[in-house]
Amino acid sequence: MNSASTVCDDHESLSRQAAGRIVNALARKPDLLLCAAGGSTPVRTYELLAAHHQRAPEVFTSLRVIKLDEWGGLTMDDRGSCENQLRANLILPLRVSADRYSGFNSNPADPATGSFTVTLHPMAGSDTVIVFNKGQTSSGGTISVAGGAVVNLRTSVQPVSYTDSGIVWQ
């Protein structure tokens, strides 16, 4: 995978580039874990992946998806929820089964604080469980992996890049 940034001329070019990279990554790693975002920007990429699925459904049979974001306080079936959007544009068109999709409930467990906990259960033979506690703001929270130490997340923007070796926090 080339970790260099690519600048595209327009949204269509960006969407095609992203869809192509995902399909190429699936060729190398069929059980790829895709961290899928909601919002309008990725919709065209998801449409292109769905079109590819029509031509070659076998490419997506082991794809795993985790929901990146959600609007706190919306019901899971709300038209404006990321859950609803991902199901309509990605999960159902690519026929991602429930055991290959991880998300979280958009309704906070504690409405007074707005915090919620995301527990990512083991997938594809892994015994790693990740617990992510997050508030309604876009910064802060905690994360622990496989029962290890709880780590506070920064309250400022933390740059991250992805390489062949995995995620690199800067």
Image (cartoon, helix red, strand yellow):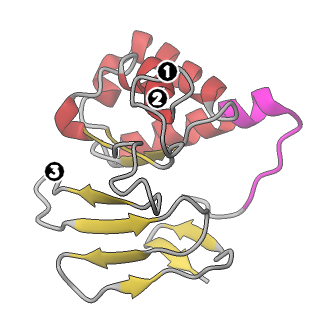
Q: Is residue 85 magenta?
A: no
Q: Nearer the viewer, residue 140 or 36?
A: 140
Location of mark 1 (residue):
89
The magenta stretch is 5-16
**Numbered disc 3: secondary structure:** loop
Above/below status of 18 relative to 155: above
Location of mark 3 (residue):
124
Name the N-terminal-most of marks 2 and 3: 2
Residue 28 percent location from the top left of the image: 37, 48
Type of amino acid at the residue the image marks with label 1: Asn
Q: Is residue 7 magenta?
A: yes
As measured in the structure, the alpha-carbon distance from the residue carrying label 2 to the one carrying label 3 is 21 Å
**Numbered disc 2: secondary structure:** helix
Residue 82 percent location from the top left of the image: 51, 34
Q: Is residue 142 left or right of residue 95?
A: right
Dot 1 and dot 2 residues touching (CB under 8 Å)? yes
